[in-house]
Image (tube, rainbow, N blue to C red):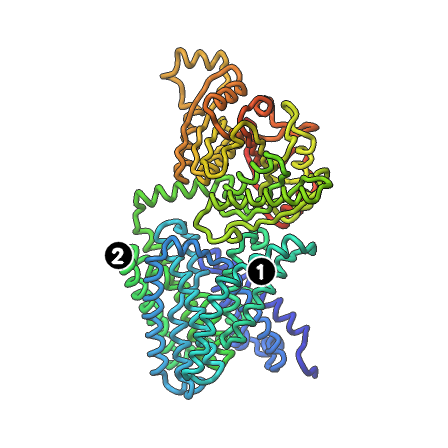
């Protein structure tokens, strides 16, 4: 007979738990329930309650009682807990909490206090036969109180989103309260875990746990926040190996988890806080987050929750004493959480119907309580009977939450101001800049380079987009190149400060990197940098154009970047207005999507600089146009100009920018745009364009004529890659996932 742990048995356990858990989770999801419920049910089927009763020999082979074999599976479970807490923190959107903090704070505090008190009181009245250690009754009571008190933000967010209420006011309040619930819950639990570890409760132990936790949180959200940001950026920009940022993220999470263990609290707090800091990192692109999430959801989540089911003994729950306790826990958890959240909602200023919906929405335990019960069992604060009762409570409350919340939310009418906000947010979610996760600005020492630096700084500051500045000029004069690079960087930072005056430091708003590269290798330098993942490239260098054609270096620079790009060209006396003055912007538009992207960029610049925007819609007159304007205006359908200008003005209202709309019917579009820019004294002319196939960069006849004739500074914005772009394409998709698609027709 083989002694010691068997790798073959361990792999068989993982494969069976993963397969059955995934199938059961899929079945639950198809009937509108969270997948983790199915994964727990899968574990129950594989555990002693079902498989052990029907086929004890098979169950014994699959889950042998040898301590060494159990230790291997327990190690997988602990790693699953670590990764689940890391992912939960990464998915915690603190901006939602900031928007609904007043009712969220009162809901969370009362929603935790009431059920926590119920759980602690229950723990003190439990018969000794149900306690793992009568001498540690207080620790067991604290575990029970915590298990009853905290909601699962993952389950709450999932259900609210599936019901279509994620952006509704009450949905945001529920989610914000759940975020605070989870955060406070893990802090409370880490302290209680520390008490359980020491085996006694005294003033010194409590003080050490509380003070250590407070110091850890203070350092994490100040110094630690910046360190995490820089480490992730460094791994993404410097390391060439595959999925290097994922390794860095896991290392950061592990380091903070170990740190919390060293200060005497449980590693779950370190993993959760690490996830929050990582999720706030400006370099964390959607692709990186998706890669890490895929690993956790695909492997560790079904295995962990199936293991929870394997450890649950349904036969024990059938005993009258434990069945009565389980029913009591479910009742106390449901009533206590509902009453506490309802009271907090009323204190926070919500209506009765809104508070009722919040009470229903906060009553889901799910993964949080399962993790609490698992850790409590492993530390000896809970026995298998209490563990099974808490898991049953978590499953029942999670199953009951979606239908009760659906019924409560269905009774809530949509208010006028809420409807307006939802419409604005829908428009913003489809916007061009909202999908840009990282900016690259490539500049030289010329006025166009400084203009590009300032414009990018304004957009980066007002939209909080991380930015890298790449100096591509200077030639052989290293000293001159260094001075020009510093000047461009200072200009970029000044633009960021103007765009977002509320941030404390530049590093909080955009990660700014200064580089010096040889002018002749601009295309190669951009191509190399682009592999690090950027959603938009802005170029500012001279010579920019020769007549109506872009310079060959501009073409090579654009071709080195596989994604959206913009080109800034400084002209005129004002050079797009000096810093401190609001930009007077003219944006030329048609009914195409690319022209609207240019208008969106213009609005962002006006918002950041406290400037103004005029949207000029130019139509080239033809026989049909002249006939309609002369004879058929009353019968003409709603024309494209009106619709386009209203859309741009509506977008301006989102950001407090008044957009003046003008329409012109002319014989030459380019001549009309140039004349309007000159007569109006505009500092900057913005055009949304689309590249055409050609030897050199070419946007069409109208932009080419404007390029040659414009008296003021120019900004051409293209939401799609140039036709000849090369290199960086696969890398950009792999490392960033932030490339932005655009419309088809040019101006």
Image coords of residue 476 (percent x, y): 73, 41
Closer-to-camera residue (387/184): 184
Residue 389 visible at all: yes
Residue 20 visible to the viewer: no
Height in image: 173 above or below 587? below
Residue shown at the point (64%, 43%) measured from the top left: 471
Residue placed under numbered mark 1 in the picture: 298
Which residue is at the front of the view, 102 or 390? 102
Q: Are marks 1 and 2 in contact (CB under 8 Å)?
A: no
Residue denoted by label 2: 352
Residue in view at x 32 percent, y 43 percent: 417
Q: Position of residue 239 (x, y in %)?
A: 68, 56
Give the vertical position of 52 relative to 586 (above or below). below
Secondary element at image label 1: helix
Is residue 342 shown above or below 533? below
Q: Nearer the viewer, mark 1 or mark 2?
A: 2
| Residue at x 43% of width, y 50% of height | 502
Q: Nearer the viewer, residue 700 or 657?
A: 657
Q: How many marks?
A: 2
Quadrant containing the C terminus is: top right
Direction from residue 401 to residue 305 in the image, left or right = right
- Residue 354 image point, x, y percent: 30, 55
Nearest to N terminus: mark 1 or mark 2: 1
Q: In front: 200, or 203?
A: 203
């Amino acid at each position: 007979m083989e002694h010691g742990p068997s790798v073959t048995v361990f792999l068989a356990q993982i494969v069976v738990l993963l397969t059955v858990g995934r199938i059961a989770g899929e079945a639950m999801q198809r009937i509108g329930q969270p997948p983790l419920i199915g994964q727990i049910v899968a574990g129950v089927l594989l555990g002693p309650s079902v498989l052990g009763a029907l086929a004890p020999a098979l169950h014994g082979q699959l889950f042998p009682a040898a301590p060494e074999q159990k230790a291997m599976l327990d190690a997988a479970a602990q790693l699953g807990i670590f990764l689940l807490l890391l992912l939960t923190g990464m998915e915690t959107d603190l901006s939602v909490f900031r928007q609904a903090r007043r009712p969220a704070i009162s809901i969370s505090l009362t929603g935790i206090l009431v059920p926590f008190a119920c759980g602690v009181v229950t723990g003190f009245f439990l018969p000794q036969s149900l306690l793992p250690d009568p001498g540690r009754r207080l620790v067991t009571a604290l575990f029970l109180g915590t298990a009853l008190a905290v909601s699962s933000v993952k389950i709450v967010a999932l259900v609210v989103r599936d019901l279509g209420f994620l952006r509704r006011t009450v949905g945001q309040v529920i989610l914000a309260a759940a975020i605070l619930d989870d955060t406070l819950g893990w802090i409370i639990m880490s302290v209680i875990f520390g008490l359980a570890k020491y085996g006694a409760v005294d003033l010194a132990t409590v003080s050490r746990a509380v003070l250590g936790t407070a110091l850890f949180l203070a350092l994490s959200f100040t110094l630690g926040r910046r360190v995490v940001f820089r480490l992730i950026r460094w791994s993404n920009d410097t390391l060439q190996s595959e999925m290097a940022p994922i390794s860095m993220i896991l290392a950061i999470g592990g380091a903070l988890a170990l740190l919390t263990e060293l200060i005497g609290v449980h590693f779950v707090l370190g993993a959760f806080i690490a996830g929050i800091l990582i999720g706030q990192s400006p370099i964390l692109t959607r692709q990186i987050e998706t890669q890490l999430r895929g690993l956790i959801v695909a492997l560790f989540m079904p295995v962990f929750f199936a293991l929870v089911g394997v450890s649950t003994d349904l036969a024990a729950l059938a005993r009258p004493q434990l069945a009565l306790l389980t029913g009591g826990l479910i009742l106390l958890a449901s009533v206590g959480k509902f009453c506490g959240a309802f009271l907090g909602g009323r204190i926070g200023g919500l209506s009765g119907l809104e508070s009722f919906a919040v009470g229903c929405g906060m009553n889901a335990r799910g993964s949080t309580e399962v993790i609490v019960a698992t850790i409590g069992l492993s530390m000896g604060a809970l026995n298998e009977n209490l563990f099974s009762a808490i898991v049953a409570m978590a499953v029942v409350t999670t199953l009951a939450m979606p239908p009760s919340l659906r019924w409560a939310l269905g009774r809530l009418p949509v208010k006028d101001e809420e409807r307006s906000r939802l419409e604005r947010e829908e428009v913003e979610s489809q916007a061009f800049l909202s999908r840009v996760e990282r900016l690259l600005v490539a500049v030289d020492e010329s006025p166009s380079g400084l203009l590009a630096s300032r414009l990018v700084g304004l957009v980066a500051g007002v939209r909080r987009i991380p930015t890298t500045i790449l100096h591509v000029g200077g030639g052989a004069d290293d000293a001159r190149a260094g001075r020009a690079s510093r000047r461009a960087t200072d200009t970029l930072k000044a633009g960021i400060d103007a765009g977002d005056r509320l941030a404390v430091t530049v590093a909080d708003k955009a990660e700014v990197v200064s580089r010096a590269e040889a002018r002749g290798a601009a295309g190669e330098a951009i191509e190399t940098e682009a592999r690090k993942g950027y959603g938009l490239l802005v170029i500012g260098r001279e010579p920019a154009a020769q007549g109506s054609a872009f310079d060959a270096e501009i073409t090579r620079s654009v071709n080195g970047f596989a994604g959206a790009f913009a080109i800034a060209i400084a002209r005129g006396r004002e050079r797009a207005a000096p810093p401190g003055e609001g930009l007077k912007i003219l944006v030329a538009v048609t009914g195409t999507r690319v022209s609207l992207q240019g208008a969106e960029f213009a609005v962002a610049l006006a918002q950041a600089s406290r400037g103004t925007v005029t949207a000029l819609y130019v139509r080239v007159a033809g026989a049909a146009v002249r006939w309609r304007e002369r004879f058929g205006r009353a019968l003409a359908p709603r024309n494209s100009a009106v619709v386009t200008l209203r859309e741009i003005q509506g977008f301006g209202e989102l950001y407090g920018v008044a957009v003046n709309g003008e329409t012109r019917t002319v014989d030459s579009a380019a001549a009309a745009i140039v004349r309007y820019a000159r007569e109006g004294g505009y500092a900057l002319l913005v055009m949304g364009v689309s590249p055409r196939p050609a030897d050199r960069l070419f946007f069409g006849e109208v932009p080419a004529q404007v390029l040659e004739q414009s008296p003021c500074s120019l900004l051409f914005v293209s939401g799609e890659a140039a036709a000849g772009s090369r290199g960086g394409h696969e890398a950009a998709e792999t490392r960033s996932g932030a490339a932005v698609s655009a419309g088809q027709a040019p101006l």
